[in-house]
Image: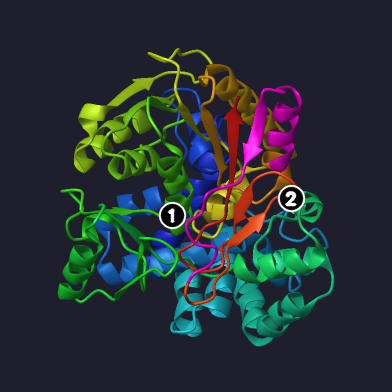
Amino acid sequence: MRGIEGALHVLEQIRASREGPFASAGGRGAASCRPAGTSASFASEALRKLGGEMSPGDLTLASSLVYAVLRRQEMWRAVYGKFLRDSRGDASLPPLIRDCLLVGTAGLLELRHFAGGVLVNGLLDHLKSHSQKRWVPLVNAVLHNVGERGVARVEALRRSPAAEERALWAGIPVWSLPAWTRTWQRADLNRLFDLLPQPPLSALRPAPGKRDELLEALRERGMEAEPSPLSEAVHLSSTVLPTDVPGFERGLATLQTEGSILAASLGARLYREGLILDLCSGRGVKGGQVLQMCPEARLEGWELSEGRHRSALREMKRLGVEGRAALRQGSALELEPSEPPSLVLLDAPCSGSGTWCRKPESKWRLNWERFDRLAAAQRSLLERAVALCAPRGIILYITCSLLRQENESVVAEVLAGHPECAELPAPWENGQGSDGVKPFRRGRPWGTYIWPETPWLDGFYCAVIIKR
C-alpha cells in the first residue's frame, strides 16, 4: 500500500471511530472513562496496523500526511474551501473527496520535501481506482489553486489580528476558542498559538541514576540525544517508538513527554510515607515513575479500562516495581483503598488540550457537551480524592489541559467545599532550564501550568492540596 493511499485509509479509520457510538474526547484520562470493551482509533494505532503492509518510506509519508492534516484540519478546510464554487463549501462532498482535498492541501503547504505534482497525481489516481473519476476535475482544480495561492492564505491567517483566524492557524478548534480566551490574556494566548503548532519530539525518562548510560547507548546507535536542562529527561531529535529505545525492555528508559515527567516528579517529591493511591492510573507511566524515584513507596492503582489496566501491569513488571504496586481494575468512584492513602495522585480525564500537538485527532472528537462532561467528572474525582486521603495527606491533581474550566475552576470549587483543605506551592526543582526556558506559569489563583515551550514539553496543570 502506497503512502498516499495509507494516509487516506488512516483518515477513514479515524472518521469511523469519531462517528461511532463511543467516540470520546482525547487525552489519557478520557479513554479511562469509556465503558469497558469499547475503543477509539487514534492515528498512531491505525498507522501501526499498516506497518506490515508498507515499506518504511511509504509509512513515513503516510504518517507525515496524516499528522499534517490532523494538526490543523480546520485551517486546511478553510484554505481549500476558498477555491470551491459551491456556496455550501465542502458539506456536500463525499467523505473520500474531502479527505483527498485535506491530504492534498496539507501536503502541498506543509511537506517541504515532497513533490507537489506527485502528491496530486497520486490522489487523482486513487480517485480513479475507486470509481470516483467524476470528481477528478474538481479535486485537480482546487489543489492547483491551493498550490498557487495557499501559502499566501496561510500567512494571512498567521498574521491576522482576529483571534478566530489565529486559532485556525494554530490548529485550535474554533468551538473551543471561548475556553482559551477565558483562561489566558491576549498576549499569552498569542504566545500559545505560536507554540502549539510546533511538531513534537520524543523525550525519554531514564531509570534513576542511569541517564549517562542511556545517553551512551543512544549515541552508540547513532541517535542524536542530549540531556535536558530542565529535568532528568533525555531529548531526542526525532520521534521514536518504544521498541527503538535501547534498554527499553529492561527498564533503562521510558518514552514519556517531559511535561509528564515533571508532573509525576512532583508526586515523588511530595511522598513521605504510607500508601500512594493512583486514582486513574492509566498505563501506569506516572505511577511507575514515582515508584522508581521512591524505592520505599507502595502504590495502589485503579483503572477503569481493561486494556490500560493490562498495560499498567506490564509497565510495572518492565520497570521492576511490580512487587510494590497493587493494580486493580474498576471505577475510581466505587473502589475502596486497602488503607487511607497519604498521597493521592489524580491524573484526571481531560480534554488533552496541552497534548493536541502530539495527539491531534483527539481535539476533533470534542465538543462543548463532552467538554462539560469532562469538567463534571474532574470535580467528582477530586471530591473522591479528598474523601479518601488520610488526614495530613497530600492530593496531587494533574491534567494535560491548558484550560481554566478543567483546572483552576475545578480546584476552586472543591476547595470551597472543604475548609480542611488548602493549596500548597508546587515544589519544582528548577524554575527554568539552563537554556532560559521558563515553562512554569502560576494559575489564577490555584495551581501551576507547564507550558509547551519546547518540542519535548506538552502542556500540563498541577495543583498540590493538603488535607489538614
Magenta-colored stretch includes residue 437: no
Quick one: 464 or 331, which is closer to the camera? 464
Q: Is residue 201 left or right of residue 318?
A: right
Task: Classify the position of the C terminus by image quarter.
Answer: top right
Q: Residues within 10 Å of mark 1 (few under 14, many from 20)?
A: many
Quick one: 337 or 168, which is closer to the camera? 337
The residue positioned 27% from the left and 62% from the top of the image is 54
Residue at the disc numbered 1: 9
**Residue 390 drawn at (x, y percent):** 50, 19
Magenta-colored stretch includes residue 423: yes
**Residue 143 drawn at (x, y percent):** 62, 76
Q: Residues within 10 Å of mark 2 (few under 14, many from 20)?
A: some
Quarter of the image for residue 153 reads: bottom right
Quarter of the image for residue 89 reads: bottom right
Q: CA distance from mark 2 to mark 1?
A: 28 Å
Q: Is residue 115 left or right of residue 326?
A: right
The residue positioned 57% from the left and 63% from the top of the image is 439
Q: Indicate the amino acid at tag 1.
A: His
